[in-house]
Image (cartoon, coloured by chain):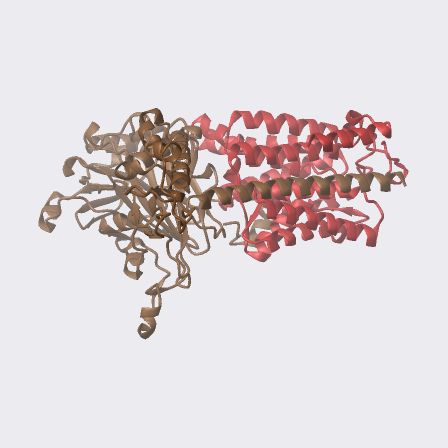
Amino acid sequence: MYRFKNAPKLLLAIALLMANERAYAFCGFYVAKADAKLFNKSSQVIITRNGERQVITMSNDFDGDAKDFAMVVPVPVVLKKEDIKVVDQSIFDKLDAYSGPRLVEYHDQNPCDMRRYMAESMMLKSSSRVMDDIAPSQGLENYKVKIEASYTIGEYDILILSAEESGGLKSWLLANGYKIPDKAEEVLDPYIKSNLKFFVVKVNLGEQKKAGLNKLRPIQIAFNSPKFMLPIRLGMANSDGSAQDLIIYAFTQKGRVETTNYKTLKIPTDANIPEFLKPKFGQFYKDLFEVTYKKDRQATYLEYAWNLNSNNYTHCDPCAGNPPKFNEFKEAGVEWVTAYQNQEQYSSRISDYDGEVFFTRLHVRYDRQNFPQDLIFQETPNQDQFQGRYIMQHAIKEKITCESAKEYYGQVNARRKKELMTLNTLTGWDVSLYGSYQNEFANYASGSKTEVKTNSVKPKKSTKKSVKTVKNKSDLTSWGIGLLLFILSISLFISRRRIRE
Amino acid sequence: MENIFSCILGHMKTKEIDPIQFLLADARHLQILFLSAFLYYGIRYIGWEADWQKFITIFSTSLFSQLLFCKIFNKDYSALKSALITSLGLCLLLKANHVYTYAFASFVAIASKFIFQIQKKHFYNPANIGIVAAIVLTGDAWISPGQWGSTAILIFLVGSLGVAVVTKVEKFDTTLGFMLVFFGLEFYRNVVYKGWPFDFFLHQISNGSILLFSFFMITDPVSTPNSKLGRLIWAACIAVLAFYLANFQFVNAAPVWALFFLSPLTILFDKLFKENRFNWRSKNPLQPISNTLPTI
């Protein structure tokens, strides 16, 4: 982060304008071989960072013909064969399931008989697919393009190119059947000037057939670089102008990852939402993100942050999917964790690994207009945990008639009204369509004559919890402001009195 | 709220003090007002967390440390206003997991004014050294350069309010020197040399953190060199170092580090370019500090 690697050197820095620039870390996105097919609207990336060591795993929702897939990724160094791996798509599915926004359900306690149901949790599946491609190589001299290395790994043919100028690189890519949109050129030049290499991937159809693969698997690259960033500009050149979604799963040792050249905001969370959203939860979150995004288009959004330290006994709360295990960490490129040795004690331990791991999930919706720069990250010591969590409180299904029933139904009505307002605020849905939801128990609450039972039990006020928290917070706020003003006025008063004296 | 205001105003009236005159009598009054406004803006409109524990810790530690040091070393209690500015600076910039870290940063910030001084002039910006100490020594703190985002409105807000403060303290030259050199180098490197489109550069210069640094941190009239020429060269040095750190060492929040490394140069520049010291309450900056009288 802010740590200096060469502190003494830095002190002499004034005259070092001419110093050589070090190559950066880079991962860029997809360039089509054929025209429109490959426009990838959503991609997923796993980034792990340990000192200067960085491992990037890229997955994309490309679903065209494998022979049409092509990918160009700017990288800081000429990668060796052992630095490139093909991994299984399941790692993305697991991380997605584990960290996705979650729906939590609670069931009201029957105010008449104290029965109680506990919650189950459900998670939102966000789509994720694989990417695919093919690989060529043709005459180079005229284009001032050099093939630094060439490998076949798994089902992919990989070339690592270096170029002297963007025009040559562009012409070479076009001559070799890669479709480069016009806008790409404005990005290639700065990348070449930054001394980056280009990691070019296509699918080797023969290998793919041999392996019997239908879908393209994610590619993982590893390198050392002082710069912690992700190039999205090349991907934008590929886009048709509309915004693209990128989910970033970041693993670090110390704490949360955030962007330094864009705001990192939290998605709205801990909201009570109506019961009828259960089958529509995916759509609900999609619209929630849309509304949140529209409020601030120049930001990255935090969807999940959790301390997965082997000593932390709560690896999720509630768990939408299983927390990652040792093997999955390895697959994701989290190289610094070690397998837990003491197997006898394993049963009493939540994790089968040893090590410090902090997991951050960021969601970025980017386009050319709002994201003129690549994403630059920093690892902070921030250990605060965060999750997108939405609470559904189910009313009692069977009709109840005890003394508390009236009060209970009154509360259900009131909370349902709030839920609909929340839904409207979060997603912009027209909630007037759901009047029946709010009024479902209106008759019982106001007009119905319920039998009086002496042993009635007060309804469980589970929904009150969040309300209470909010109230406390606002109390604290007013206290805080009061205290600050108090200190302020006292100090001003004292300082003025002293001056007079 | 109204009661508090009417109480303060009432107090001023009985003492026959014009609130406007009071506000303008000392540049620090304006600075306190503006920094508070930024904090409010961040919490209300950008969505920063209102961490009251943090704010209370920072303010109380700073003010109590200042009181303590004033009692021991000198009796200039008007420095409490500077402590308020330092506190606001820390609230705006510093982040940490624990309140102890905030307390530590606040204490170091205030203590530095009394420890790192030559001929009764401190040469570290208190908030700056507090932040650096917390990050390096505790490992629990960080700065979020992206927290302001980049919006045109913010340029206007921070810029114009900032100008008001710095012109009031007559040290606009520091801001100008720093911004011209830093943005000039960034422009040359990214737009002219590398060929990034212009909005790349625009995004960079409209970052709220860099503007806040240029207008409010580097301009601290006490810890900057006394002479105009000295200040200009000093600001340019910081800009060059910040540029180098950001572009060649990939350091985030580079200006904050550059200021920290080069603050001691103030002593050297004061030796090279002789000039009388700045005094907060003096209408004439050339007036020696011992002869100044409170303007209110």
Q: Position of residue A280 (x, y in %)?
A: 27, 36
Front in this rendered view, residue A292 or B14 = B14
Q: Position of residue A412 (x, y in %)?
A: 38, 38
In terms of image quadrants, where is residue A473?
A: top right
Q: Position of residue B30 (x, y in %)?
A: 72, 31
Q: Is residue A227 left or right of residue B1?
A: left
Q: Is residue A324 left or right of residue A226?
A: left
In terms of image quadrants, where is residue B39?
A: top right
Q: Position of residue B233 (x, y in %)?
A: 68, 37
The colour one sees for chain B in the rendered image is red
Q: Is residue B243 left or right of residue A145?
A: right
Front in this rendered view, residue A3 or B57 = B57
Front in this rendered view, residue A465 or A113 = A113
Figure check: A121 above or below A174: below
**Count of numbered circles on the image:** 0
Q: Which residue is at a point 40% across and 49% down the rendered structure image?
A: A456
Whether residue B118 is visible: yes
Q: Which residue is at a point 31% across and 75% down the rendered structure image?
A: A344
Figure check: A393 above or below A435: below
In terms of image quadrants, where is residue B35?
A: top right
Q: Which quarter of the rendering shows the C terminus of chain A?
A: top right
Whether residue B182 is visible: no
Residue sticking out furthest to the bottom: A344
Front in this rendered view, residue A209 or A379 = A379
Chain drawn in brown:
A
